[in-house]
Amino acid sequence: MNRAADQSEANPLREGLSTRAVPQPCSVVIFGATGDLTHRKLLPALYNLAADGELPPAVAVIGFARREKSDDDFRRVMEEATRKFSRQTVRDEIWKTFSQSIFYHQSDFSDEAGFKTLAERLDKIDKERGTRGNRLFYFAVAPDQFEPILKHLKTAGLNKAKEGSWARVIIEKPFGKDLASARELNRVVSDAFSENQTYRIDHFLGKETAQNILVLRFANAIFEPLWNTRYIDHVQITAAETLGVEGRAGYYEGAGALRDMVQNHLLQLLCLIAMEAPSDLSADSIRDEKVKVVRCLRRMVTDEVASNVVRGQYAEGAINGQSVPSYRSEKNVDPKSTTDTFVALRLNIDNWRWWDVPIYMRVGKRLPKSGTEISVHFKKAPFVLFNKGTNEPNVLVIRIQPDEGISLRMQAKMPGTSFRIEPVKMDFHYGTSFGKASPEAYERLLLDAMSGDATLFARRDEVEEAWALIDIIENAWSAKKNAPDLFFYPAGSWGPEEADELLARDGRSWRRF
Ligand code: BG6
């Protein structure tokens, strides 16, 4: 029997186990509607939800931006973008219906009048389209635009919903550039919206495989008893990209890999791997457990940064046989830039479960392959019986992307008359087991925000705790005296050699991708 078809009949994850709250009719107002995120992610995600019949019965999308445009102009641009970036081929009849719910509102973010007319327009849309006074404000803009937008939303009364309706705000990263700016941003946001109206997006949490970490750990009885310092030797998390800075130097120069990826995405993945079981599946129970992990991360003192964190920047090199320029010669990058495009870190979680289990993370641009994975390396079996020659430990690999799935490496006897032992893999692939493509992270997250489910969004305390850790490293790097070195690596390599040495010093090595 065809395996996928077989599993589709028996697989409980395909039916009946959904605990999702119902997404409600609403207007989605996108600030920064002419920007890259709207084109590449938001509109394609909304279209795919529409095509899969997942959107609530009434949804209106209102693009808010400065440039002069009619609704029809905006629809045309969005159609082009959706055709280019959608994960499913755009079907004309679906687009035609969906596009009728897209509108454009032209205004400057600092123009109070533009928000007043927005409020009137939303009221009209509610009446005509049945969006019930529910509003989702999506901030796809640079953080320096947050304050005026929030101020004017408040003046126009749009931060408060009418009786029986809701108003929510989705905030894109970067959520600050250090603890002080994140706190300030939180203060500004909380002046208009309460914490339970605020959805700080971390798109890694919307990835199917990231969500599956909790299922793997807490819906299976066999892992939890082993999930601790007694059986786990160490954990590795790698997020590799072949892409370079791709025209985002304006943002990336002031951020770097540590702020861009570690502060949010990688620490969020670590929290899912390391957290205790929540008391229930509510957003706050899960986030309470996650934030405890960040709080337990050992804070380095400045002198320890150099020996626990390696920063790198790509030099000229080749990716897939094509030569690519160095970071410093990319457009809008300072030729003397010291921005990190690669980081490798060694972290420790100071609690009973993870005592003495190092966590190694690495993230980088212009690496030889693209992919994100977490590997849990178990301790070796005793050297008593078979393992005198080779003794490969068990490794559980969670592939976040691509080829989403999980594999377990174990030892097996090779067929034959002698006792030769070789490592083999037990492998689960989402694609073949479920016979269905995973939705894009933004699809899931938009629906969650429409349902009022904040589980996959970062809470204020998580974000601030994460910055407190990152600040120590950034401060050491920017110190005038004795700052740790920046190491260069050729594009297309796995980062500077010092990243390998970080593990070699502990008698370990990075898992080969
Ligand atoms: C973004 C970072 O948050 O995540 C980018 O700003 C990075 O620099 C991207 O390329 C990676 O996300 P994904 O989903 O493509 O792995």
Image (cartoon, rainbow, N blue to C red):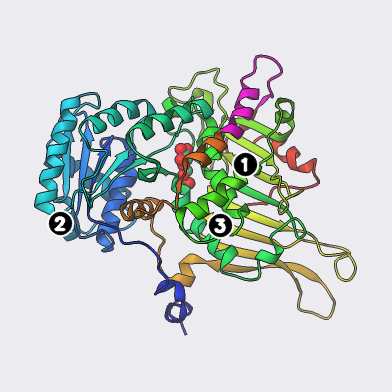
Amino acid marked by disc 2: Thr
Front-lying residue, 183 or 106:
183
| Cβ–Cβ under 8 Å for marks 1 and 3 | no
343 displayed left or right of 92:
right
Circle number at residue 97: 2
- What x and y, as percent, mark residue 500? 72, 40
Look at mark 1 in the image and give the residue it sits on: 295
Q: CA distance from mark 1 to mark 3?
A: 26 Å
The amino acid type found where label 3 is placed reads Arg
Percent position of residue 214, x then y: 54, 60
Question: Residue 369: in sight, yes or no?
Answer: no
Q: Nearer the viewer, mark 2 or mark 1?
A: 1
Magenta stretch encompasses residue 144: no
Q: Is mark 3 within 8 Å of ligand 1?
A: no
Q: Nearer the viewer, residue 497 or 28?
A: 28
Q: Does 474 lie within the magenta span?
A: yes
For badge 1, the amino acid type reads Arg
Which mark is on residue 399?
3
Sequence-first tag of 2 and 1: 2
Q: Residue at x 46, y 57 (%)?
A: 282
**Secondary structure beneath label 2:** helix
